Amino acid sequence: MNQVAITPWHWIGFIVCVLVFIALDLGLFRKGAHVVSFREALAWSALWFALAMLFGGLMAYWRGHEEATEFVTGYLIELSLSLDNILVIALIFAAFRVPAEFQHRVLAWGILGALAMRGVMIAIGAELIENFAWLLYVFGAFLIFTGVKMFFEKKGEAHPENNPVLRLVKKFFPVTADFEGQNFFTRLNGKFALTPLALVLVLVETTDLIFAVDSVPAVFSVTRKAFIVFTSNVFAILGLRSLYFLLAGAIGMFRYLKAGLSVVLVFVGAKMLLDPHDREPKWFQFEISTVISLLVIAVILSTSITLSVAVVRREKK
């Protein structure tokens, strides 16, 4: 079967479909703030996962099983790394004491900003790799370093007062002392001002940018095709909001998840170093297939989650 060539129209069509679903998910057709229930979060999480798998099926039909496997593997990597992002977002919300009914709005706009940033980073990354393939060795070493660092670092707390981005924002804009409903902007003494909710949004966007530095190169360990890297990132980010409301309250149960994620980062970093893939110089030549990568990552994550749940249950007994 001949592959369907990816054209600019495919990019445009995908982005338009994503924007339509974002409009539904982000509440543009709902009035007022509301607390996202567990059932609602579960429904949206299931929907985003089903859409991702449907897209993977379409990739298999249009582009072949190899690229479909690359998409699913990239999606799994992004989705797993976003779980650590959920913990950080929960710490930010706790530090600012963000009411539950306002958290949906912050994550809603945070997703839009994250999609834009990821798109720019992927475009730059794909162009750099196309012209300087040796950068893959740099990315691989960086992922291994990040994975080892993640494994040994202790659980932290959010300290907004130490964030340089927030200090810069406060330098140029006045900030109200209290929340103004779910508004990001307001008037203070007749002048334009930010609300604490806007500061939370800035922190959430900054957090995603930091995590993207790890996750985007990780997907390039699976595929060099920008369309697959972008679509796998998009589906993972779209599911982040619903995953937060689904898992934030129970994220403490997954005590070995961070260790599992660190092993995933080390694995994909090693794969990036070992896989020659038409690079010069070829210091090592040990290719790991995409199917094997998918299985290894799935085993690592499932083992860390299963072990976490088992230990928590034993302690409760």
Image (cartoon, rainbow, N blue to C red):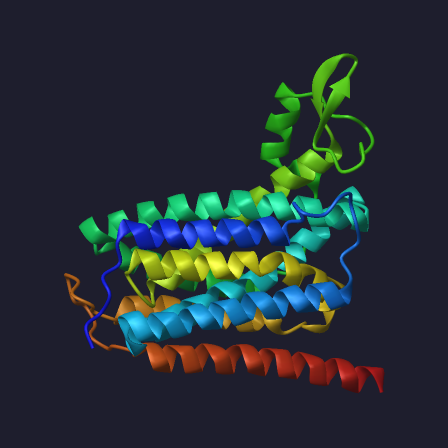
Give the residue drawn at x 63%, y 47%: 108
Q: Between residue 35 and residue 121, name the one nearer to us.
A: 35
For residue 281, above or below residue 197 = below
Q: Residue 277 at what x, y percent from top left?
A: 20, 68
Q: Residue at x 72, y 14 (%)?
A: 191
212 is higher (above) or lower (below) than 274? above
Q: How many labels does the image show?
A: 0
Q: Nearer the viewer, residue 4 or 313?
A: 4
Question: Residue extending furthest right?
Answer: 317
Work out whether 162 lies above or below 260.
Answer: above
**Res. 102 visible in picture:** yes
The residue most toward the front is: 29
Q: Quadrant of the N terminus?
A: bottom left
Q: Quadrant of the C terminus?
A: bottom right
In this rendering, position of residue 269 left or right of residue 194: left
> Where's residue 263, x and y in %?
48, 72
**Which percent across, then down, holds residue 105?**
69, 45
Residue 122 position in % (x across, y down): 36, 50
Q: Which residue lies furthest to the top in this view?
A: 190
Q: Nearer the viewer, residue 40 or 107?
A: 40
Residue 283: image quadrant is: bottom left
On screen, residue 230 versus residue 286, left or right, reads right
Q: Which residue is drawn at 50% across and 83% down?
A: 299
The image quarter in which residue 71 lies:
bottom left
Residue 267 in view (yes/no):
no
Report the residue at 28% width, 60% height from top.
225
